[in-house]
Amino acid sequence: MRLIRLFLLSWATGLVQSDAVDDQLQVEEDHNLTARAVPPTNGVHWTIHSSCRTDDQGQPDNAMRDAIIQAVNDAKDRSKLTADRLEKWKKDCHSDRGNFMIGGENRIIKKACQLLLGDSKVTTFGKTAFQDKVDAAKTWYDAVAQIVGPVGQANNQFHVSQEWTALSQKDDHWLNFIIYCGPDLVQRMNPSTMVNQLYDQGQLRFVRDDKVHAAMRREYQADAFDNEDQFANAVTDHNKEELSDFETIDGKRVPLADRKHVAATITLHRLMLKKFRDRNFNIKSWDGDLDSALKMGAPGPTDTYAPIDHMVGLVGLLHHEMYHTPGLGMLSDKDQSIAYDWKNMEKNKDSELPEYLMFLALLVELTDKKIQVHQDGTLSDRR
């Protein structure tokens, strides 16, 4: 199952792919297995694992803890802003003539509408494709804006708090999620094969040595990526249909009884977080800041990334990953060759991609600050 968010930082390029498997299955990669979206659930709970609040020596790491919490809260705020602004955009960007009206006070907004929301021609159902896209996207943003957490923050216990333990006893706990700062792997005897194998303590299943969690651990221990041009920043795991985690009850697909109490996991690459520390946990940009992005020129014909891509940062990374979780849509990256980056989102405008929803929210936030985003991903200051 391909559930991974990748990004080019100033020190790495490229894509990798990941599957999570149980102790016996060799899962065949098939986009159709994950190309299904489920309605988001309002009131999803989340928390962080102890790995996100301790350093390599096991000492408290408040800076990393606070950066991750702030990044999630910023994604929430960005989602709330976007849900609110999209209602206004639906009016500002639509014309009875079926064309965008460019000019006047809302010129920046109308230009932004064209980039990711498409045209406003009326469909046979009396609505526009533009309006349909806005209404669908607003549903996802409303759900993220209402997530609850981090659970257990009051006593700094988080995933070992009484509150999170209580949630784990409920049959809808699989809709919640927990953020890990590095994979939680141990060696354990696999009763099916009678050999020691890596066991994911977050998802409660065995994983193969050639999968992304194992690579994350190996790279961190070596303090170097296996391939500087190709590595994963994060991976999201949850109950999976192709692993027979689900059963049908009253016509609905729900996790098996023993999987209902396993929350989704978003695992961040700890070596990536180390790079973030070197940048003082600047969570809203991969490198530099808005001022440096404003100075960047247009990408060349062979360039993959545009200035706006540099503004994704940890906020955008986690925002993207949230949409992979069951409680927030279980959206798939689908075709990974076009699943990431501004260029692909602007070209294809696929509103059920996590990357699209992340970029649309970033576009709204920048536009709200009177920063104009252009088709090529360059930025202009209109303040």
Image (spheres, rainbow, N blue to C red):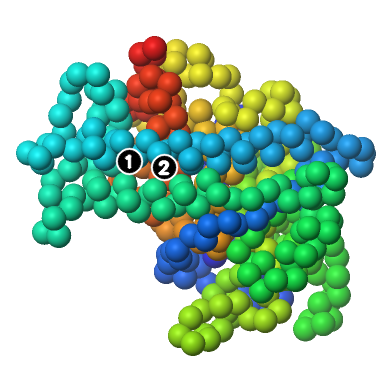
Q: Residue at x 40, y 32 (%)?
A: 363
Measured as percent of width and height from the top left, residue 174 is found at 64, 67
Q: Let me know if residue 222 appears in the view.
A: no
Q: Residue at x 48, y 60 (%)?
A: 40
Q: Nearer the viewer, residue 254 or 306?
A: 254
Q: Which quadrant is the N terminus positioned in?
A: bottom right
Specify few, some or many for label 1: CA neighbours under 10 Å numbering under 14, 14-19, or 20 or more. some
Q: Which quadrant is the C terminus positioned in?
A: top left
Using residue 74 as the reference point, say whether residue 193 is left or right of it. right
Instruction: State the CA–CA distance, disc 2 to disc 1.
Output: 7 Å
Measured as percent of width and height from the top left, residue 177 is found at 65, 57
Using residue 371 as the reference point, say whether residue 203 is left or right of it. right
Q: Are marks 2 and 1 in contact (CB under 8 Å)?
A: yes
Measured as percent of width and height from the top left, residue 156 is found at 84, 44
Q: Let me know if residue 383 appears in the view.
A: yes
User: Which amino acid, mark 2?
Assistant: Ala
- Tell me where residue 300 sits by quadrant: top left
Q: Which residue is mark 1?
A: 87
User: Which amino acid, mark 1?
Assistant: Glu
Using residue 41 as the reference point, say whether residue 306 is left or right of it. left
* Image height of 74 relative to 131, above or below: above
Q: Residue at x 22, y 34 (%)?
A: 93
- Tell me where residue 164 sits by quadrant: bottom right
Q: Which residue is mark 2?
A: 83
Under circle 1, the secondary element is helix
